[in-house]
Amino acid sequence: MIPVEADFEHALGVSDARRTLHTQGAEDRVWELASVSKPITALGTLVAVDRGLVDLDEPAGPEGATVRHLLAHTAGYAFDGDEVVGAVGGRRIYSNTGFEVLAAHVEQATGYDLDEWLEQTVVQGLGLSDLELTGSPAAGFRGSIRDLLALGRELLEPTLISRELWQESVTVQFPGLDGILPGYGRQRPNDWGLGYEIRDGKSPHWTGSASSPRTLGHFGQAGSFLWVDPDAGLTAAFLGAEPFGKTHIRIWPGLSDEILARFGGA
């Protein structure tokens, strides 16, 4: 067991690119994912890009914005609501609205409702067992530890998209932009790939002090996280019964460091 200093129900899992290495708590229990929904929506979008149905640089969202801007939180939308509060590409403004607009764009491009598209591409493609694709594509999905670990393995070694597109997706988009990382304040810069946050030198941060700068992933206000550390060849996921708060801020970095220490040489 990995010690977790939390007095609420939770589940934890660790995997490398080939197999699950460790779980504690029910690996098939379904929890709220909150914003960990975004990497799932992002991957479905990238499948559409890989199949030639969507272009990263085609117009989407406010005037001057593209699919790439929406994925990288640089389209200028507010966190919620339709208001545009910044210039396209001017700063990193984390936005649920941007992902909802992205989902509508993918629906139009593919001819499928987003849940149907994700079911046919991501769910079936990765053999996911528990994912519930209801609610907002930005923050409304529900899923299990075993599903998140399967997603993490895909982000370590892509199978649904080309390696070239995968490499682009985990590379910083619009480098140098500052922005607020919810729960952790202003980051200079606040680096992001195509739907995935990239750690780089951010501090404070929800990953560990031993996490490589290339670590990518997402956390959610449900008290959820998925990270992928390409240098360590590991992915880890956490889901729990308490919303994100001071306990998560306190325990997550040390938990990530413990995972890297125990399994980094696996």
Image (tube, rainbow, N blue to C red):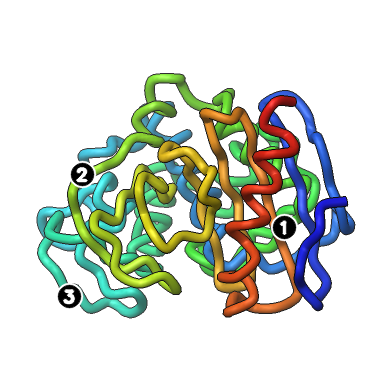
Q: Quadrant of the C terminus?
A: top right
**Can you see residue 100?**
yes
The residue that disc 3 covers is 85
Farthest residue, direction top = 163
Residue pictured at 77% horizontal, 63% vertical: 4
Q: Residue 70: x, y in percent?
A: 30, 54
Task: Determine the CA span between mark 2 and mark 1.
Answer: 32 Å
> As displayed, is residue 145 above or below residue 239?
above
Q: Which residue is located at x 68 percent, y 68 percent?
A: 32
Q: Amino acid at mark 3?
A: Val
Contact? badges 2 and 3 (CB < 8 Å): no
- Rendering quarter of residue 91: bottom left
Query: What number is the disc on residue 175?
Result: 2
Residue 138: x and y, percent? 48, 63
Q: Position of residue 71 (x, y in %)?
A: 34, 50
- Mark 3 to mark 1 CA distance (whole Å): 32 Å
Disc nearer the start of the sequence (3/1): 3
Q: Nearer the viewer, residue 182 or 61?
A: 182
- Tell me the amino acid under the disc marked 1: Gly
| Label number found at residue 79 | none
Vertical relation: 219 (above or below) 45: below
N-terminal of the pair, mark 2 or mark 1, is 1
Tell me if mark 2 has few (under 14), some (14-19) or many (20+) residues whose alpha carbon lies within 10 angstroms of its own: some
Callout 2 secondary element: loop
Q: Would you name the residue on which mark 1 appears?
A: 143
